[in-house]
Image (cartoon, rainbow, N blue to C red):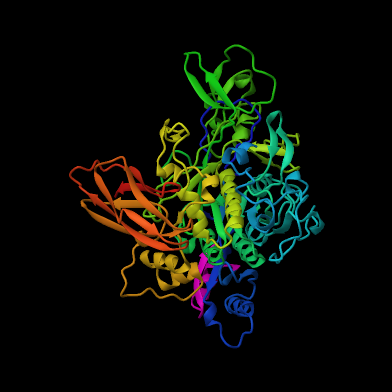
């Protein structure tokens, strides 16, 4: 598994860059593979009463043995099935078939945070009424229903808008749900079509979470208050989610760490129909064009229904352009740290010190230096440097500190009775659409205490017989549900806000400096981080609740964005589920998207103009602009310099001009920000300037 998490069982001192596995096509044989078929709903022949009958008839015309795995009505229009290459080619020739795409595999991206973020303040966020009507849908490994984080004490009836319930399965009955955990479903057809039946000796074929990841993410987002939460003596205190009174619906789409696109789309399809308000998905793949990315496609449908979709960036660490989930209608979240850390220092014999993190709860190490050995020199196995089970020679490592290379196997597997480490967040620029800055922002993702499964120990290893109610893990899997929960809080205060408005509020109020005025640092370099690492900055919910101005977007805006990408009509239909024709008389530009950040890509001298529109959500006021730039290579000017608003919801536009002098330019990335302020609100948007 490659979640964005570390699980700890020993003192391991190193720098950990969690591996976010790439985008891969999975099939289980030379002939048959699973495909997702996008259909043009409007082209259904009049002889069919239901789209599902049309889909079945189309499939039968090319294969008598193929079965419909799922039919989709909300996330996409179409179905999934297993076909041979020849059957796929035949299906593509049928009327109404837009595209036939191979299924892809996604992988999981694996307390003090409410206090750290300020969401414990009841004066800012309501504790009754609308706050308990918001429903967060979590697509992950399921839920441990017995966790105290899902207690419904103090909650009223299930919201009247909720349309679903819970389903029975192995080790799970619908009666385990309550007024907090109001939905629990599981989706296996895509996984089982490729991997075979779920191995019920290892995990429950039901919504029950035998992995821990799903319970951790869902309780981080909306967990009820649990006093006295602790893990093996660490992080003692009250554990609670960001939106503790919100309801949660769990959709289990990941099995043994694998999450298949056909199952993910089926869950999104169901969750849209169920009327969830927020999607939280701590999973991803590598990057792919939006019309081929099932998460991006499903998220577009959710956005149209007013559902904010929060996704993790991935854990590829130091490398640039390693982000997942970069579609502009997705809120893309990277990982930052919080104030309670578990620091440890490795002191080498030459006097050099290396800082790291340890959650070691074994016998104390002796108060003397210990021998140090590289795993590759203590193994006869080809991959011994990875410290996999059984690869190290006991007499060569006993009593020594072992340094293991990252990658392939779990970090705790490397350190079983060995060391543990900290993690890093994937970073930009955006490799699919460089003119859209990603990530959007960062949130706490390191050493997060939240609910855990009762099926596994805190390390997640089969050899760990311990059982805990809470666990401390790290990664963008943890930062994503923080933003999901915060979005739920904002939705409860501002139910009329669109997903883009909520994201704008979170981004434009994020902070980029510490309380002492110094910039947020990049742990990998020790230098100030940039918008390619932190996006707009670290989320600040106490200011996001009243941002002053917002940058809003509609479905029409996103369709114009797809036109700017020169997508074909069928590609646009695959994403948007509609027939849409780009206006041939109009000049479309990705830069026209009213996004709360600037990513300017230049290839020489020139003038680049961008127009943006802001909406006042703070009432009447006069906002003046301030430009911050670290370079003189590019001159940044804003017109007008003052925006005067007379009433709430009034819109004003402004133009930003970037003037590039290539003779003076250093041709390296440069950063800055544009801030509007009325003396009470500061509405900031980051600027990233890159040379192509």
Q: Residue furthest top?
A: 368
Given residues 251 and 418, the one toward you in this image is 251
- In the shown orientation, is residue 138 left or right of residue 551? right
x, y percentage for residue 621?
A: 42, 55
Given residues 166 and 179, the one toward you in this image is 179
Given residues 463 and 160, the one toward you in this image is 160
**Picture residue at 34% right of the left edge, 46% below the top:** 626
Q: Residue furthest left?
A: 663
x, y percentage for residue 201?
A: 76, 48
**Picture mark count:** 0
**Picture residue at 22% right of the left edge, 51% below the top:** 604
x, y percentage for residue 324?
A: 49, 51
Q: Quadrant of residue 70?
A: bottom right
Looking at the image, can residue 313 be seen? Answer: no
Looking at the image, can residue 635 be seen? Answer: yes
| Magenta highlight range | 80-102
As for residue 87 lying within the magenta part, the answer is: yes
The relative height of residue 15 versus residue 32 in the rendered view (above or below) is above
As for residue 329 lying within the magenta part, the answer is: no
């Amino acid at each position: 598994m490659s979640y964005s998490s570390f699980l700890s069982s020993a003192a391991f001192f190193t720098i950990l860059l969690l591996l976010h596995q790439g985008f891969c096509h999975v099939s289980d044989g030379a002939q048959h593979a699973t495909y997702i078929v996008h259909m043009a709903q409007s082209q259904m022949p009049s002889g069919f009463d239901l789209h599902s009958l049309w889909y079945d008839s189309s499939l039968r015309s090319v294969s008598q043995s193929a079965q419909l795995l799922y039919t989709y009505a909300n996330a996409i229009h179409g179905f999934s099935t297993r076909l041979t290459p020849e059957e796929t080619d035949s299906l593509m020739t049928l009327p109404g078939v837009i595209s036939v795409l191979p299924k892809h595999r996604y992988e999981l991206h694996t307390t003090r945070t409410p206090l750290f973020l300020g969401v414990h303040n009841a004066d800012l966020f309501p504790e009754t009424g609308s706050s308990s009507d918001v429903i967060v849908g979590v697509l992950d490994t399921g839920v441990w229903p017995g966790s105290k984080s899902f207690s419904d004490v103090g909650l009223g009836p299930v919201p009247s808008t909720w349309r679903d319930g819970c389903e029975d399965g192995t080790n799970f009955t619908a009666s385990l749900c309550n007024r907090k955990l109001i939905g629990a479903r599981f989706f296996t057809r895509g996984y089982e079509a490729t991997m075979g039946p779920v191995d019920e000796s290892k995990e429950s074929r039901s919504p029950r979470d035998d992995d821990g990841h799903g319970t951790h993410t869902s309780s981080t987002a909306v967990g009820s208050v649990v006093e006295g939460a602790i893990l093996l003596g660490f992080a003692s205190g009250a554990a609670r989610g960001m939106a503790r009174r919100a309801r949660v619906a769990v959709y289990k789409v990941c099995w043994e760490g694998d999450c298949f696109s056909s199952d993910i789309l089926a869950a999104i399809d169901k969750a849209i129909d169920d009327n969830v308000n927020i999607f939280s998905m701590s999973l991803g793949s590598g990057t792919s064009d939006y019309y081929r990315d099932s998460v991006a496609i499903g998220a577009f449908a959710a956005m149209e229904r007013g559902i904010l979709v929060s996704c993790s960036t991935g854990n590829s660490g130091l490398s640039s352009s390693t982000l997942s989930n970069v579609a502009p209608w997705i809120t893309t979240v990277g990982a930052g740290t919080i104030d309670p850390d578990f620091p440890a220092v490795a002191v080498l014999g030459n006097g050099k010190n290396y800082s790291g993190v340890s959650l070691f709860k074994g016998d104390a190490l002796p108060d003397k230096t210990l021998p140090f050995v590289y795993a590759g020199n203590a193994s006869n196995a080809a991959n011994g440097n990875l410290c996999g089970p059984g690869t190290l020679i006991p007499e060569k490592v006993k009593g020594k500190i072992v340094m293991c290379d990252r990658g392939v196997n779990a970090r705790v597997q490397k350190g079983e009775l060995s060391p543990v480490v900290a993690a890093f967040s994937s970073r930009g620029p955006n490799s699919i659409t460089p003119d859209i800055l990603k990530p959007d922002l960062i949130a706490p993702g390191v050493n997060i205490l939240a609910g855990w499964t009762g099926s596994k120990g805190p390390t997640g290893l089969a050899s760990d017989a311990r059982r805990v109610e809470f666990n401390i893990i790290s990664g963008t899997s943890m930062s994503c549900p923080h933003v999901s929960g915060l979005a739920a809080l904002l939705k409860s205060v501002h139910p009329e806000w669109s997903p883009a408005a909520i994201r704008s509020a979170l981004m434009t109020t994020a902070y980029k400096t510490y309380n002492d005025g110094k910039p947020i640092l990049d742990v990998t370099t020790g230098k100030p981080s940039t918008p390619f690492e932190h996006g707009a900055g670290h989320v600040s919910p106490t200011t996001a609740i009243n941002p002053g101005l917002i940058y809003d977007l509609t479905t029409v805006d996103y369709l114009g964005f797809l036109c700017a990408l020169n997508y074909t009509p069928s590609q646009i239909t695959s994403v948007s589920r509609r027939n849409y024709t780009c206006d041939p008389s109009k000049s479309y530009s990705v830069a026209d998207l009213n996004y709360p950040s600037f990513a300017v890509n230049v290839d020489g001298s020139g003038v680049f103009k961008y127009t943006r529109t802001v909406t006042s959500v703070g009432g009447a006021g006069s906002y003046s602009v301030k430009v911050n730039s670290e370079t003189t290579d590019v001159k940044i000017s804003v017109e007008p310099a003052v925006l005067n608003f007379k009433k709430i919801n009034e819109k004003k536009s402004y133009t930003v001009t970037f003037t590039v002098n290539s003779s003076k330019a250093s041709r390296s990335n440069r950063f800055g920000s544009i801030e509007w302020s009325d003396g009470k609100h500061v509405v900031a948007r980051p600027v990233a300037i890159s040379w192509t």
